[in-house]
Image: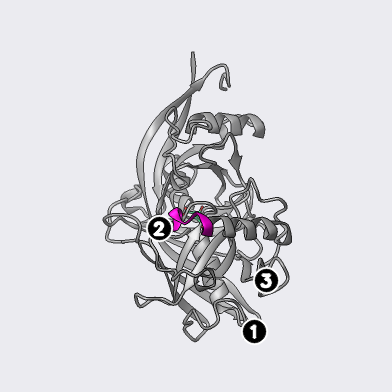
Amino acid sequence: MQTAIPFMQFRGGSSKGVYFLASDLPQDEKLRDRVLLAIMGGSDPAQIDGLGGAHPLTSKIAVVSRSNRPDTDVDYLFVQAVVGEDRVDVTPNCGNILAGVGPFAIETGLVKATADETLVRIFMVNSSNRCELRIKTPGGQVEYQGEARIDGVPGTSAPVICNYKDLAGSACGSLLPTGNIVDVVDGIEVSCIDNGMPVVVLRARDFGISGYESAGEMNANTELKARLESIRLQLGPKMNLGDVAKKVVPKMSLIAPAVNGGHVCTRTFIPKVCHTSIGVLGAVSVATVCIMPGSVAAGIANVPSGNQKHLSVEHPSGEFSVSLDVGGTVARPEVLNAGLLRTARLLSKGVTYIPETLWRGK
Ligand code: NQM
């Protein structure tokens, strides 16, 4: 016998995830996580017995509920099912999967479409940050087709405009979690940041590489990966993340001067596999390091002037544009708002099954 659980599957930005109403899952968190792991395919690296796609970018889950807060409509918990391991990680956020939360909230009736465009105000449970999404809803229906293009995704779709409100210290408690703009670990200078995503920014050249290698070449470089992991494990406690051996943060972003007309070039490990593009909040965090005086990005990133900064973050499959609304002082800039463009598409909906021995359902 099996238990049927309603779900929808969306491509959110350049990731793919399985979306649930919190009310369709067990309320006990440990049981909920076991159920979610079973749905994705358990600890098998191929996730052959579940809906997961056997890659960190396609092994993602959103758990959504109506928000009790006055300034948000829905609460969104992001859950990463760690590929090849029998566990989930709820430490980080995911801004790509978040792009699908707006359409999901409207499709499930949690938010009513208002006009040609509907504002969905989201509370991100993982980090207690807010984000507002603008979703195209002509005739009260979510519009998925459109002309917006994002790198890492073939074709075009309707735009999902994302405005992040208060990102600093999302998981680490502060923007510069070590208290320094530059730290030195294993002889390498790094800048640790958390503006929505904990990220360690490093210069590619300090590892004897150009930073323009393909994601495949990066993944094949076992010596580089071992050096990055050594630095990551030492920085975890200093970034207030504790022992990060089993966490998917901090991400490790290698930077080099832009080569395709952008402002900085990146290769980001998430944290053990090189991203084929870059995560949303990962890109916001890297862009934030670029505007901080004295960071490892000085002399590498070419930062536009003014308080409204549009930064193009290059990555292995194109670029990611981030608009930063900057306040604070020249020495200590603060990002007041981060705006970016994503797209999302409903891929499937229905019920997924787990063994009844695991959970008998509601
Ligand atoms: O940084 C990848 C992705 C992500 C997360 C990762 C993300 C973000 O591309 O907000 O979107 O860094 O694990 O979906």
Kindly tell me whether mark 2's CB lies below 8 Å from ligand 1.
no
The amino acid beneath tag 1 is Thr
Question: Does the Cβ of the disc 1 residue fall within 8 Å of ligand 1?
Answer: no
Q: Mark 2 = which residue?
A: 217
Quarter location, residue 356:
top right
Marked residue nearer the N-terminal end (2 or 3) = 3
Q: What residue type is labelled 3?
A: Val
Q: Residue furthest top?
A: 1
Say which element carries label 2: helix
Quadrant hosting residue 151: bottom left
**Who's the residue at 66% across and 74% down the image?**
182
Q: Do the residues labelled 2 and 3 touch (CB within 8 Å)?
A: no
Q: Which mark is residue 329?
A: 1
The amino acid type of the residue labelled 2 equals Glu
Residue bounds of the magenta highlight: 217-224
Image position, residue 47 (x, y; %): 45, 33
Residue bearing mark 3: 184
Q: Which residue is drawn at 49% across and 61% down?
A: 268
